[in-house]
Amino acid sequence: MVGKKYLAELVGTMILTFVITATVVSSKAISGGAFGIGGLIAIGLAAAIALTAVIYSIGHISGAHVNPAVTIAMAIAGKMKTKDVIPYLLAQFIGGIIASVLLWAVAGPSFGLGETTAGLFGVKGALGMEFLATALFVVVILAVTAKGSEHAGLSIGLYLGAAQLFGIVFSGASLNPARSLGPALLVGGQAWSQLWIYFAGPIIGAIVGLVVYKVFIEEARRQVAPSKPVKMAAKK
């Protein structure tokens, strides 16, 4: 069963990365290389649907982190075994690389491979967006999973979709080192030289998001929670 967790993370990350990057490539191909509002909406929808599907498909096996930044946050929070951290990270990175290799085999490099680079607001804007968007992402993940909602997967997927809409012009809205590594390895150039943004921003953001959740949301829940469980009156 242990091996199944790692395989699930590999496959889940591969699916998520392939869907998002393939949508980027197809959007550019349709528009002749330009990138407009239609492409932005398409990527947002693709990301939301893909992550939601992945969570409901493999969440019961591995937790469906499919993101090294999320895994690091969960490890620090004590929500996974320490021995699983490195295998999870390796599986996620391998999954992202496989996705890029498959996309390259199918589409070639004409319109790129969905690589992420600093956008209209420069390196500072890209780093800041990756940091902030991932911090909020982790807050959402921890909040909805703590409630045990059956709609947690949908909530998480919808956030990632929204992040594409508000974050792509800044940084490509990766929020995920594994999603950025694969394209950067194959495309090289600026995507490779700026890859540090997509490691530093999401990882630091995930840790800060965990702290924000612990201090403000989890603590607030403790304060409002009743000290004793409320018993429902028995029906006569």
Image (cartoon, rainbow, N blue to C red):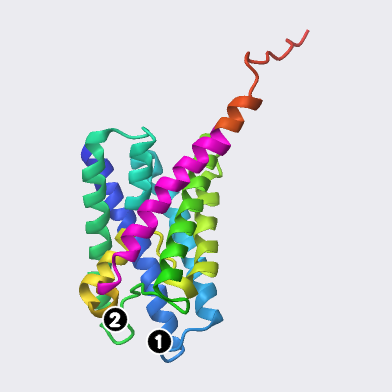
Residue 197 place in picture, x, y as percent? 34, 65
Q: Are marks 1 and 2 in contact (CB under 8 Å)?
A: yes
56 lies left or right of 220:
left
- Name the mark on residue 105: none
Where residue 46 sits in the image (x, y, percent)? 47, 67
Query: In this figure, which residue is indicated by the disc labeled 2?
Result: 107
Mark 2, other Cα within 10 Å: few <14 / some 14–19 / many ≥20: some
Q: Quadrant of the C terminus?
A: top right
Mark 1 or mark 2: which comes first in sequence? 1
Q: Amino acid at mark 1?
A: Ala
Q: Is residue 145 magenta?
A: no
Q: Is residue 229 left or right of residue 29?
A: right
Task: Tell me if I can see residue 102 in this picture.
Answer: no
For this view, does 29 lie left or right of residue 96? right
Dominant secondary structure, magenta: helix
* Residue range (magenta): 193-218
The question of residue 201 being in magenta is answered with: yes
Q: Quadrant of residue 224?
A: top right
Q: Secondary structure at mark 2?
A: helix
What amino acid is labelled 2 in the image? Ala
**Front one among 151 and 160:** 160
Looking at the image, which residue is at 33% across and 54% down? 12
| Numbered disc 1: secondary structure | helix
| Whether residue 60 can be seen here | yes
- Please state, as top left, top right, bottom left or bottom right, where the N terminus lies in the image: top left
Residue furthest out toward the right:
236
Total labels drawn = 2
Q: Residue 156's x, y, as percent?
A: 51, 51
- 144 relative to 31, above or below: above
Q: Which residue is mark 1?
A: 29
